[in-house]
Image: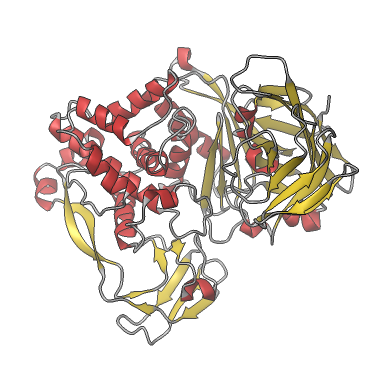
Amino acid sequence: MPRVKLLKNNTYTYLLIGLVALLSACDQCGVAYWQPQLTNVTMSPAQAQVEDNSPLRFTVEHQRSRTGDPSLVINLRYKMSQRFSNGYIDFPQHIAPARIEEIELLTPGTRLLDTKDGQVKEIQHGGHHDVHLRYRIVLANNEQDVRSRTPVIRGNYVQAAAKTILAFPQSIGTKRLARIEWSAPSGWQIFSSFGEYTASHIEQNAQTIWEALFVAGENLRVHKTFANSDKLENRRALTVVVNGNFRFQDDAFIAIVTRIISSQRDFFQDYAYPNYLISLSESGRRGAKIGGTAHHNAFKVLLHTDTPLSNGETAHLLSHEVFHNWNGFVIKKAPKWFREGFTDYYGLTLAFRAGLIPRKKYVEIFNKWLWTYYASPLRNELSNRMEDMVDDDDELFDIPYQRGAIFAARLNAQIREKSNARHSLDNIMRDLVQAARTGDSAVTIEKINALAKLYGSGGDIAQEMAQLMDDGRDFTPHGQELGECYTLDPERVGTDFELGFALHPNSGVVTGVKRQSAAAQAGLRPSDVLSRYEFAQGAPHLKATVELAFNRRRISFFPVKLETTRDGFQFSENAAHWQNKPDFCEQSLIVW
């Protein structure tokens, strides 16, 4: 049985992972033919001076199929292929700047053939031979380009989702088993979504392992704590693994994380988690202050070393990733505007209810959603164009987040108004999670509509929801989304010429760059942070100049003239209400 080994000497560090996935011939059959899949993953030697560009090397053994299929198809795309059969191997969901290099066939008599699609290769092997092939994943450029979805690979540290480093068959299946055995050198620790390991093994269905998080290294700061520690019957273990030096103390981070997890488990009354892993490491990327991804019973977060905990943005990120534990891993199938947009809304709202985001910051973030969404010329795009986008460079990436979050607040206000505050969107979310726990894990517009009617939304909203969410039709916020102490005001958003990028109005973070625009060609990228920018309003014949905050690099380009600006909305304090009943207004967001 292969084992995972972490081998270390004075000069080099290696990571060796062995995976045996026992694949049933048929997901529906309860029987006895098992088709093994062996994957060995090796991190090539990494010395300190080159640790920012350390590659991961893979060796894959695909044992002969029961049917004698004479070929395999390997897909080099960063996203999973939609073809599912046992005859295909799918390479990991690595996101640029990671790339696959050096594919080698190790079985005599096999050939690597091109297909019409340049990113898909066919391996001919005769049908009755085990097929060995080796490839490696390399992080391009340097550590400054690491993003939340890429592996973090350093000389004495690895943090990665299984889907970003392990090659799985394309049809994973819920009944197929995978087994990983670990052994580690002295001084190394290994953590995963399934617990801590030194010399042990994991055996789960392959889908669960594919969704898991793995962290390994030495000199890690490991903290054991509990969620819901004030309720002994609901105490559940949490493991927080920290790698990096930040401007805050570990204890401060742990206090926020435990409060978020505890409050959200209380929200759903769901404590069925024997263990939970939180991994914090340095992003190392100049323009990206924060980023994170959710995994099975775990989440990871990457923060720039100077990121503060007190800005509200970090608590919102952490709360968003924790909420995916239900909207993503319990509710497994939902449109992106629901999966990400409703999660963004509840990430913000539940962090506020837990006392981690001040009222003014809540309103500021909500107004940023409104400003950015209504200023975007891409806000009317069809939902299905955005569904599978995972690349941070795509200008459509943020639209479903904003569209879903703004609509969630609108629907919540509508239900509360029609039901005289007896019900809210909270009821729908809890019902959807409960239904998913009993096997109905898909969310559709029809299902949301039925629950909204049950809780008094005031009629059938399915057609309207489809037009707004799927077709991208413009919609107006409810007006009472932040309570009676706030007024919805129309506002002109955007500029009278197109800069080619979208910018949060207060933070200076570039939220999107239009492909092929002058800004993109000049080198501006999403997540860059601008310290200042200059442009002559109404004069596109004059160059716009932006200055990046971290390296003070200046970029100049000619913007494109637009005919008009766009209509948008912002919430402001209702002066009369705040003057007449300030105490009520101070607490009204919590009530609402």
Image quadrant in which the N terminus is located: top right
- In the picture, measured across the screen, residue 352 lies left or right of residue 60, that is left
Q: How many marks?
A: 0
Q: In this rendering, is residue 568 above or below 576?
A: below
Q: Quadrant of residue 26?
A: top right
Residue 451 percent across, percent down from the top left? 26, 27
Front position in the image: 576 or 316: 316
Residue 11 seen anywhere in this rendered image of the structure: yes
The colour scheme used here is secondary structure
Say if residue 57 shows up in the picture: no
Q: Position of residue 5 (x, y in %)?
A: 82, 33
In the image, farthest residue toward the bottom: 541
Residue at screen point 91% across, 43% down: 108
Q: Residue furthest top?
A: 233
**Vertically, is 334 above or below 94?**
above
Q: Is residue 30 shown above or below 191? A: above
Check the picture and name the quadrant holding the C terminus: top left
Residue drawn where x is 33% and y is 55% of the image: 368
- Where on the picture, by quarter, is residue 251? top right
What residue appears at the point 46 percent right and 44 percent down from the top-left corner?
317
At x 67%, y 14%, the residue is 31
Residue 384 image point, x, y percent = 41, 48
Q: Is residue 221 above or below residue 468?
A: above
Camera-side residue: 57 or 450?
450
